[in-house]
Image (cartoon, helix red, strand yellow):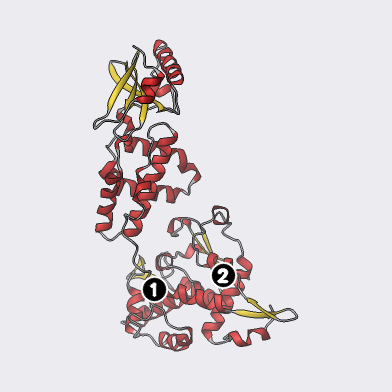
Amino acid sequence: MPLTEIQARNSKPRERAYKMADGEGLFLFVQPNGSKLWRMKYRFAGKEKLLSFGAYPDLGIAAARDKRTAAKALLAEGKDPMKSKGEVISQEGATFFEVAKRWHENRKSALNAAHADRVWSRMERDVFPAIGEKLVHEITAPDVLAMIRKIEARGALDISRRAKQGVGQVFQFAIACGLATNDPTTHLRGALKPRPRVKHMSRLPLNELPAFIEKLHAYREEGERRSAITRDAVLFALLTWVRTKELRFAAKSEFEDLGGKSPVWRIPAERMKMGREHLVPLSQQATHIAKSMIAAAPGEFLFPGNGPNKPLSENTMIYALYRLGYHSRQTVHGFRGLASTWANEQLVEFGKPPMWIRKYHEDWVELQLAHSEKNDVRGAYNAAEYLAPRRRMMQDWADYLSGEKVIDIKKAGKRAA
């Protein structure tokens, strides 16, 4: 006999999931967590399949029967309802992996390609081996937590949070498609291991920079040529605020207008952490290093390693800092923090009555550091945005390092805004 509204409404969860038949393949699937899903069993091309129509009571009995009628009409035409209806999938396809695949395909066009690849790669590495083959509506909070604990065990606490976030997004998609009624990640608040306190990259006080620069100019290792390359690479990193990887693989072809008024280093998106092209305006001092290395260095890399077509070793610059006596006191990545501190501390006196204002807008600093912008609108910036004021800022920084125009905050008001 067909189900009645009272039977559907009064059905109670049991220890095991069970079915309440309505007829012609349609039934209400009652789960131990209390959710009630409309499903329809049918055969196509000799195979038994299962459609999922949605959750009761959001989808009432009459609506579920309408969907059954539509599905049977498709079968009568020789069509598979699973392939003809975008909102339903087979029982075999209702695994977390299949739902995640649909979720990813649905959203990746709006994402940066490199970011989309990273998200999917993280799923393949950590999530799918644990819950990929489980039916999405049967996955529980303990299932997800067990997966997260494995990631935490290797110390990857940031990745564990991103994995939880990704799983939650898949479940939100599944709920919208009628494939699940509950997001188990919402029950994990407070269950994940807390992040350790942030340990910033070692960096010197700004007042010790002159002594550091003096030692760097005198740096020597095996062979004068290798010494010169290392010295220039370390100084170039300090002058440009870039990450080690971005500098090591710098290619000569990425530098533009070195003989003109607007020299720039155009770093391609695939080498940037945020996956977008980055323009670095070059100071006169940085331009001089780039021109010298292009003229003298063989091969494609600006700073070659132990071979014309090999990049600088990833340890070359940090080992140089160790030899200079700055072990645990200064890292190459720490140059970025040094520069940011300097830029954010520069003030100028402006107006009458006088007031102190920032000399360099925070957006200029963040763009120069190629930091991610949390706000989607501001994050979709043009790579050339603020290029002119950033060029002035970088020239001031280079002059500060060379001792030509060391700016004292207390005396900054002497200069024009």
Q: Is residue 177 visible?
A: yes
Going from the N terminus, do you reach mark 1 or mark 2 first?
1
Image position, residue 375 (x, y; %):
54, 55
Instruction: Name the foreground residue: 300 vs 132.
Output: 132
Q: Quadrant of the C terminus?
A: bottom right
Residue at position x 41%, y 39% in the image:
103
Tell me the element at label 1: loop
Label 2 crowding class (10 Å Cα cut-off): few <14, some 14-19, many 20+? Answer: some
Q: In whole angstroms, how far apart are the C-alphas of marks 1 and 2?
A: 32 Å
The answer to which image quadrant residue 325 occupies is bottom left
The answer to which image quadrant residue 396 occupies is bottom right
Tell me the element at label 2: loop
Q: What numbered label is drawn on residue 258?
A: 2
Image position, residue 248 (x, y; %):
40, 67
Residue to which mark 1 is pinned:
201
Residue type, numbered disc 1: Met
Instruction: Name the foreground residue: 235 vs 69.
Output: 69
Instruction: Name the foreground residue: 29 vs 274.
Output: 29
